[in-house]
Image (spheres, rainbow, N blue to C red):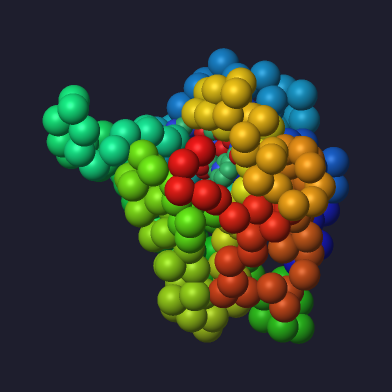
């Protein structure tokens, strides 16, 4: 699908990987809606690219429905939907502090997994009623975000790994569900990218440890590299139903 003149939604678009994805989509001529919990940052990015900012908590279904309705009203139905919003809470399943609080596990699953599913189900229903764009019958494309922790999660990341494994696992069946509507579904599983979330999770010492695990190139990924992949997925219609690791060949060890 050509990005130019399309409407795009980027959840988590106010920071890190999402913010650079907003910039990349806008640079290619999309009208972008920045959906994020952080209203001020979302507005700053939206203003930078001439898009709109909409406050959303992807873990709250009423908030998701309201945000999607606002985008539809202000810009129209978005054919490009990128689910980048995510959080992590590091904690072992049990420790001297006691069992992993269940509400922390549920919050991580609700934001990363349920939030992604919720946005996709509402977007798919709207996109299905649009005319196809090309001779393939293509109507839309979803780019969801997992993590390499979906496959080799380290100690203390059970909740995040479970949520991201869910995002990876629903990629193929969702693509199959939506094939008749001409909507593709892809997932990117990033390795270590230099963003506020990644730095706060691993700490400054953890940055060096993570980089030491990357065979090549020996550095954190750049958000612009993630954004390029996200845009390529939109532009290449043969990409569907797959999870792409974008990680410099890193494989996590047991400990960070
Ligand atoms: N940076 C990495 O190394 C890395 C690696 C693997 C996966 N990821 C995934 O990439 C995505 C982006 O991460 P990032 O590193 O850019 O983080 P980030 O913290 O810079 O950005 C995440 C954005 O999501 C928003 N957000 C959080 N909870 C939300 C909610 N409930 N509703 C709406 N918005 C919410 C935040 O406000 C923030 O703007 C996440 O899904 C993360 O799990 C990141």
Position in image of residue 222 (x %, y %) = 76, 38
If the image is split into quadrants, where does the N terminus sit? Answer: bottom right
On screen, residue 51 above or below 172: above
Whether residue 227 appears in this view of the structure is no
On screen, residue 21 above or below 6: above
Q: Looking at the image, which residue is at 81% across and 47% down?
A: 217
Q: Looking at the image, which residue is at 77% across and 38% down?
A: 219
Q: Name the foreground residue: 4 vs 118.
A: 118
Q: Residue furthest top?
A: 40
Position in image of residue 55 (x %, y %) = 48, 28
On screen, residue 37 above or below 2: above
Position in image of residue 25 (x %, y %) = 76, 45
Position in image of residue 169 (x %, y %) = 43, 67
Q: Looking at the image, which residue is at 45% across and 48% down?
A: 254
Q: Looking at the image, which residue is at 77% across and 70% down?
A: 236
Q: Residue furthest left?
A: 98
Q: Would you say 176 lies left or right of 94 here?
A: right
Q: Name the foreground residue: 112 vs 183.
A: 112
Snapshot quadrant of residue 46: top right
Q: Name the foreground residue: 195 vs 14.
A: 195
Q: Would you say 253 lies left or right of 188 here?
A: left
Whether residue 220 appears in this view of the structure is yes
Number of numbered discs visible in the structure rendering: 0
Q: Would you say 224 lies left or right of 101 here?
A: right
């Amino acid at each position: 699908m050509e990005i130019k003149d399309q409407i795009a939604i980027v959840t988590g678009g106010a920071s890190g990987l999402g913010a650079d994805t907003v910039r990349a989509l806008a640079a290619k001529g999309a009208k972008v809606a920045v959906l994020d919990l952080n209203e001020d940052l979302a507005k700053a990015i939206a203003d930078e690219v001439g898009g709109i900012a909409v406050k959303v908590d992807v873990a709250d279904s009423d908030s998701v429905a309201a945000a999607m309705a606002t985008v539809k009203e202000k810009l129209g139905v978005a054919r490009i939907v990128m689910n980048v919003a995510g959080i992590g809470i590091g904690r072992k399943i049990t420790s001297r502090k006691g069992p992993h609080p269940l509400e922390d596990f549920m919050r991580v699953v609700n934001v990363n997994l349920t939030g992604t599913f919720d946005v996709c189900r509402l977007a798919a229903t709207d996109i299905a009623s649009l005319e196809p764009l090309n001779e393939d019958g293509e109507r839309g494309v979803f780019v969801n975000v997992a993590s390499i922790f979906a496959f080799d999660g380290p100690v203390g990341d059970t909740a995040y790994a479970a949520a991201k494994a869910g995002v990876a696992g629903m990629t193929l069946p969702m693509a199959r569900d939506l094939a008749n509507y001409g909507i593709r579904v892809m997932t990117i599983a990033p390795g270590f990218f230099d963003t506020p979330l990644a730095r706060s999770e691993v700490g400054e010492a953890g940055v060096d440890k993570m980089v030491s695990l990357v065979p090549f190139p020996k550095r954190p990924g750049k958000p612009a590299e993630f954004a390029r992949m996200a845009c390529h997925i939109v532009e290449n219609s043969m990409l569907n139903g797959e999870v792409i690791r974008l990680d410099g060949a890193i494989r996590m060890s047991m400990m960070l």
